Amino acid sequence: MNTAVIPGSFDPITNGHLDIIRRASAMYDEVIVLSACNSAKNYLLTDEKRLLLIKEAIKDIPNARAESFGGMLADYVAEHNFPVLVKGVRDEKDFTYEQNMAFYNSELCSRKYGKSVETVFLPSNPSLCFVSSSLVRTLFANGAEYSDLIPCPDLFNSFLNK
Ligand code: PNS
């Protein structure tokens, strides 16, 4: 089976993420949306709630499923023999960051496990290039409207007691 892993923080999942997930699901037999759990990071949402939002957002994509993982991404892909990561890229800044992450994950996988993992970049839909999880968090923190930017605004609001 041709599987792609789409990793990220998804704090929260946005319409931009969902567009990448849909497009990847048309390219691969199976897509795993992997919610990263970095205890060193200050997330707005708990690991559990970020995962629930992803599950709700992708429920109509038959070949997509969501998982969360608390360790290093390279450990996850090597353990499961997943050879491909997919990341959306909005602009040059994203590209520079993601290129570095691609190299990092590939080197770690190769040096620790002798396995290869490739990162495939998909350009963001131009109409969604301005959408980011951090924009949603900023809008939320400032009492501004964000429900058109995320797939499950009601669930997100319920998690934040709004
Ligand atoms: O786009 P994001 O939210 O920063 O992506 C998170 C992730 C884990 C996919 C990215 O930071 C990455 O590829 N990191 C490599 C190092 C790693 O595995 N960290 C795990 C804890 S976040």
Image: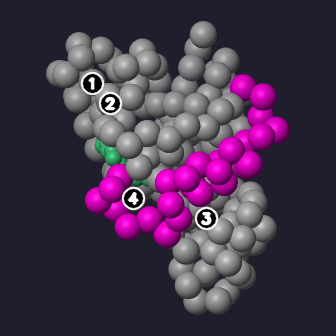
Q: Residue at x 30, y 14 (%)?
A: 115
Q: CA distance from mark 2 to mark 1?
A: 5 Å
Q: Residue 9 in the image: x percent, y percent?
A: 47, 53
Q: Which mark lies nearer to you, 1 or 3?
A: 1
Which secondary structure lies at badge 4?
A: helix
Q: Which residues are magenta?
A: 38-63
Q: Which residue is mark 1?
A: 109
Mark 1 or 3, nearer chain start: 1
Q: Which residue is mark 2?
A: 74
- Mark 3 Cα within 10 Å, few/some/many (few <14, many 20+)? some
Q: Residue 56 in the image: x percent, y percent?
A: 74, 48
Question: Can you tell which quarter of the image residue 16 is in?
Answer: bottom right
Q: CA distance from mark 4 to mark 3?
A: 14 Å
Q: Which residue is mark 4?
A: 93
Q: CA distance from mark 1 to mark 4?
A: 24 Å
Q: CA distance from mark 2 to mark 3?
A: 27 Å
- Mark 1 Cα within 10 Å, few/some/many (few <14, many 20+)? many
Mark 2–mark 3 CB contact (< 8 Å): no
Nearest to the observer: residue 88 or residue 161: 161
Mark 2 or 4, nearer chain start: 2
Q: CA distance from mark 1 to mark 3?
A: 31 Å
- Identified by mark 1, the residue type is Cys
**Which quadrant: the N terminus?**
top right
Nearest to the observer: residue 2 or residue 89: 2
Mark 2 or 3, nearer chain start: 2
> Can residue 16 be seen at all in this image of the molecule?
no
Mark 1 or 4, nearer chain start: 4
Q: Residue at x 32, y 30 (%)?
A: 74
